[in-house]
Image (tube, rainbow, N blue to C red):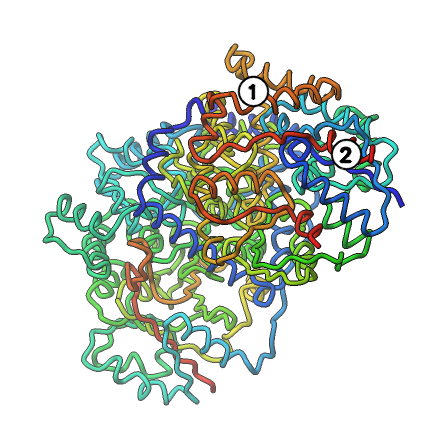
Amino acid sequence: MKVSLFVTCIVDQVFPQVGIAMAEVLERLGYEIDFPPAQTCCGQPAFNSGYPKEACTVARHFLDVFRDSEYIVVPSGSCTSMITHHYEEIFKDDSKRLEETHRAAPRVWEFSRFLLEVAKAEDVGARYDGVVTYHDSCHALRELRIKNGPRRLLAKVQGLTLREMDVAEECCGFGGTFSIKFPEVSGAMARTKIESIRKTEAGAVVSIDSSCLMQLQGVIDRAGLPIRTMHLAEVLAFR
Amino acid sequence: MTGAPSETIKQTLDDPRLQLAIYAASGRLMDHRATAVDAGVLPEYQDLRTQANQIKKHTIENLDYYLEQLEANVVAHGGTVIFCRDGQEVADFVLGLAKKNGARLIVKSKSMTSEEIHFNERLEHHQLEAVETDLGEYILQLAHQRPYHIVAPALHMTRYDVADVFTQRLGVEKEVVPENQTKIARAVLRGKFLQADIGVTGANFLIADSGGVVVVENEGNARLSSSTPKIHIAVAGIEKLIPRAQDLAVFLDLLGRSATGQPLTVYTSFLSGPRRGDEVDGPDEFYLVLLDNGRTKLLTDPEKRQSLYCIRCGACLNHCPVYRKIGGHNYPWVYSGPIGALITPQFHDITENGWLPFASSLCGACAEVCPVKIEIPKLLLKLRSEVTEAKQKQGAEGLERLAFRMFAWIMSHPRIYLLAGRIGATLAPLVPPVGPLNKWASQRTLPRPAKQSFHQLWAARKRQ
Amino acid sequence: MTSRDQILADIRTALSRSQGQPPAPLAAPLLRGPRFDRNLYVQTFVQRFEKLAGKAFVVPDAAAVIPQLSSLLDGKRVVASNAPFLEACGITRLAQVQSGFTDRDALRDACAAADVGVTSADYALAETGTLVMLSSRQEARLVSLLPPVHVAIVPRSRILANLDELLSLLPKPAEQSSSMVLITGPSRTADIEQILVRGVHGPGEIYAVIVEA
């Protein structure tokens, strides 16, 4: 069976290893990978900054690129929900594109959800020796209702111990341009998360959103702490 | 960001005592709420939210009808309804009434609406003393400060701050034990209750089919304010209406739990006018002041009018990671937190308050706990595009718009995107952190673009 | 144009409604039934009342009320409301009890000076440990509000399951009285450093006596 990857602009340019890891896991499960090379971005940065028309331009491109894809797998909760929950708003005055959105949305799958609900694979044969904690990224948690899925997948990773932090559901403080418009508040929010992560004594924090991980790693490195951030796909690709 | 109070935000962030006070107080309220709405305790919680949303939607969309019904019923029970367009009209009415009755002293229970219109200040220069009787509000009044939180107004003050305020303003000996401080306030305020000519309360709900106002509280000052003076005035925004007394079953189930985790607050008063027939006590006159002050403006937008559903429980504040860092005083208006960010730019100038919709990471925690299901993040996003449009008309923020136009162009042209990516990856180590990069770098190390993009890695992989 | 007319006109314009236009239909209120058996009402009420830091007693009949309350009322200045049930329980015959007030000022002065206010209650709500008091000739507002201690003596038959049942019985409380108050626990605040303090303005101590017969 064939699946198309929408790696997202941040993975493409900053964390390509996440995309590779995701592809490896899917191939391990017997999927043939299609990577439409014309892909770029879902348009969220423009939309969240109050520029819906500009976001529209990018969103149209996304729909065109993935027109023929049966399964679109995405290593990000926020990009997935941008397409499945917010394209509705972006295209509300464009009935043609709105219809395309309605056809595309059910075919867009956040990675962990794809594994559990389509591939029906909870154990992907991964092995990772260490203690990790899990960060619930906001769009994934509240818009896509992803909470237990990634934890079930982590539970099946041999050698891995999952220790919950007490503020797993609190926002990391990224919020796109929020991190630049209100840097002190954004930093303070991240430091609260890091403090909670430290208390778990986990060596790594895992999430399904690279933007959160980028925010957290930035604060971790500034504080000189020995904690690494890993995307779920990277953990699952470990052997 | 332009317009945001960056200096005071930094001060708040750098004050460890204040940070702890805000975080602990809101955290406690979050925990209490969670216990009270747990599926084991209140299995119908989600249904109640849906019902509350539907009742509010219906009421707001037929507001004129219910206002007229409310008015007729208040009058039928011997009360009077005064419609006021703004705070000045409220003050004029109260001053006129006070003059007619030779009133000198007003006791007030907690009312965000009255704070909104600077009620106490408007009466100050007319030989009319208005005393706040809610303990937290009383302390703030003595200290000349604004409330920090809808439900916990003096959250930011320590017992030592309170001791200083009492010593300076009441001339009492320094007292730092909260229980004793409460006793001091109780004694002073009891005298006021018994002497007051007029009692002013807010209203949590206005009941159209009954001509009634519902006031919830824990202290007893609203009961006293509406029972000892001869005149009772209730001041409420027009959006506080619900159609039927029986709808209280839904709203009272939600309000206390969402605010403080209490299934019911200590006192829930259902008041419908002056005392009747042979009732022994109660006021002789009852006035219901219905305030517009811009609410009709919010009604005009069908998508954003749900901002008026708010029942002022404060849950959104407690759960907001931004509020929990910057606290109530960094918001420009009396309403803070997510609801404040939502309604302030709608009531007031949108460009002046344009930073508020952006002071959010859109995490959605507020929408999850809002008892009347206001879609706060969705509306904040809508406001963001209205802010950028307004700024464009003013000719401001041109650079940002240009940046996003370029973003859209790059992202819809794959070859340009790939080229831009590679240029960025090559130049990144050479670029000093300026502008947005500096903003990022002030708090975190900068991420570096990967030496090879996924596109490149994948192409290489395929070649093997 | 008066403010009233202006405001209503602005509302109608905003909503595209016309004067006199009836509202869209609204679903009937959904009132919940009781969650547990009527036999458990007394027990549940006592439990919830005490969880709120009230103290509740259950006595078999009216004659058992005074012995139960003697330690609370002895040597105290007491004001009792005019509820006939209090007379039936013998409260109004006690020497230290003032009652029978019909003058507002006299009542107020007596309550302001009293140590204890004794009332009955129109209803009690089991699920929340709530006392429901409607203002009337029998029950003045201030008896349960001014004195620092409030004692409510309630016949068991007046205990309802919850607020929903109360609103089913009284769909329009405004028709009964100018004031209906639900009392759920002693007066409290946490305004100073989030530290709980009782008895801010209303009574800091509350007692309920449930009379079974």
Mark found first going from the N terminus, 2 or 1: 1
Instruction: Estimate the x, y position of residue B282 in percent, counting from the top left.
Output: 34, 55
Q: Which is more toward the observer, B387 or C88? A: B387
Q: Is residue A18 left or right of residue B357?
A: right
- Looking at the rendered structure, the secondary structure element under dot 2 is helix
Question: Residue at position x 79%, y 28% from top?
Answer: A37
Q: Which mark is residue B458?
A: 2
Instruction: Estimate the x, y position of residue B57 in percent, counting from the top left.
Output: 63, 41
Quarter occupied by the C terminus of chain A: bottom right
Residue denoted by label 1 = B388
Q: Chain of mark 2?
A: B
| Vertical placement of residue C110 versus B350, above or below | below
Q: Which mark is residue C157?
A: none
Q: Amino acid at mark 2?
A: Trp
Dots 2 and 1 on the same chain: yes
Q: Is residue A196 left or right of residue B154?
A: right
How much space separates mark 2 and mark 1, taking CA atoms? 38 Å
Instruction: Estimate the x, y position of residue A189 in percent, counting from the top left.
Output: 46, 42
Q: Is residue B248 left or right of residue B272?
A: right
| Vertical placement of residue A40 versus B205, above or below | above
- Looking at the rendered structure, the secondary structure element under dot 1 is helix
Residue B231 visible in this rendered orientation of the protein: no
- Camera-near label (2 vs 1) is 2
Q: Which is more toward the observer, B429 or C57? A: B429
Question: Residue at position x 29%, y 67% from top?
Answer: C204
Residue A15 visible in this rendered orientation of the protein: yes
Q: Which is more toward the observer, B186 or B26? A: B26
Residues at marks 2 and 1 touching, judged by CB atoms closer than 8 Å: no
Instruction: Estimate the x, y position of residue B373 in percent, counting from the top left.
Output: 60, 45
